[in-house]
Image: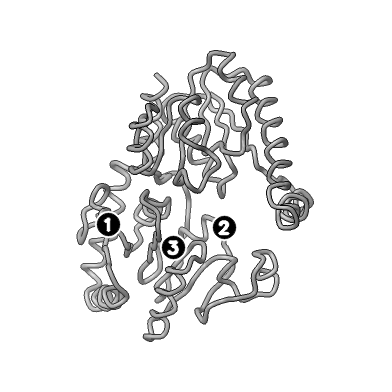
Amino acid sequence: MLLVSPVFHSYWRSIARGFEENGHHVEVHCYDEHSSPAAKARNKLVFEGFDRVRPGTGTARFVRRATEGARAALANRRPDVVVVVKGDLLADGFWDDVARAGLPHVLWLYDELRRTRHDLATLGELGPVASYSPHDVASMTVAGVRARHVPLAFDPAFVHARIPSDDVLFIGARYPRREAVLTELYARGVSVCAVGNDWSHRPLDRLRTWGWHRPDVPACPSVARAIGAGMMAGAAATVNIHGDQDGFTMRTFEASGVGALQLIDRADVGMHYEPGVEILPFGSVEEIVDLVARADREPHWAARVRVAARERTLAEHTFAHRARALEELWA
């Protein structure tokens, strides 16, 4: 099997392990990998920089480079199955090669269609599609695309060390609603920590994210995945704020998988976890404050929620479970 994936914070390793647990030999090609500091600097200056001067020009260059690399990987490795994750930076030449070879394949999307370069007409030609977005699956099905809802997942092989803290933790990109929630929590006296380069107050992180503004919230730069997992496991609570997404983020499954006390802004999380027992939905900042206070007052209750979340995740929400769902699409 050839897994063609974006680097995606190294989640490709977890996806590959899921298939390996189901008996596949997996070779991986990361089509957007920048393997050295020089390559990362080149991407920042040449591709992102070009897009800021002349929108679209840097992306077009990157698409050519990504497509050439994926086509070479396909030709050199001669797989029997191709699994593509996101893949919206791969031009028609790659998909033409897959079609000519007659290879079973599946495309797995971890973002809404409106935030990718894919469209319904294109997906109809690419063939079976899995998406974390139930709304997109419904739209694709109506448009005649063979599609299935396959959520994101947790990798139980991932090793982390618990890092205890009294903080209410948030790890992720800084969007307006997330900023508003964390700013209000901090103003109410809740011990908060936001993790990510676009939260960090360091000058270097402001420059690398192309923005100087930062909210008045305690923050630290992006951390390695293992560190982030340990922080979630050890924090007083982990807040998961989705914004305008209808699919559930990777954080949903990873936080529960490492035994975090997860507070989530989605009442519909019941499709994956039992609200109030395995995960704690909230609808306002006041509810977050109340849940954090209860966890402090009732540590045994909080511990039960953590254990139940991890047990449910291991039973139903690992990458091995998702790999089986993807197999059914290409079969």
The answer to whether mark 2 and mark 1 are in CB contact below 8 A is: no
Q: To which residue does mark 3 refer? A: 162
The answer to whether mark 3 and mark 2 are in CB contact below 8 A is: no
Comparing marks 3 and 2, which lies closer to the viewer? 2
Of 119 and 216, the residue lying toward us: 119
Label 2 environment density (alpha carbons within 10 Å; few <14, some 14–19, many ≥20): few
Image vertical order of residue 247 relative to residue 142, above or below? below
Check disc 3 and give the amino acid type: Arg
Pinpoint residue 225: horizontal percent, then vertical percent: 53, 55
Q: To which residue does mark 1 refer? A: 307
The count of marks equals 3
Comparing marks 2 and 1, which lies closer to the viewer? 2
The answer to which image quadrant residue 147 occupies is top left
Q: To which residue does mark 2 refer? A: 224
Pinpoint residue 186: horizontal percent, then vertical percent: 42, 82
Of 17 and 268, the residue lying toward us: 268
* Residue located at (44% from left, 46% from top): 112
Q: How is the image coloured?
A: one colour
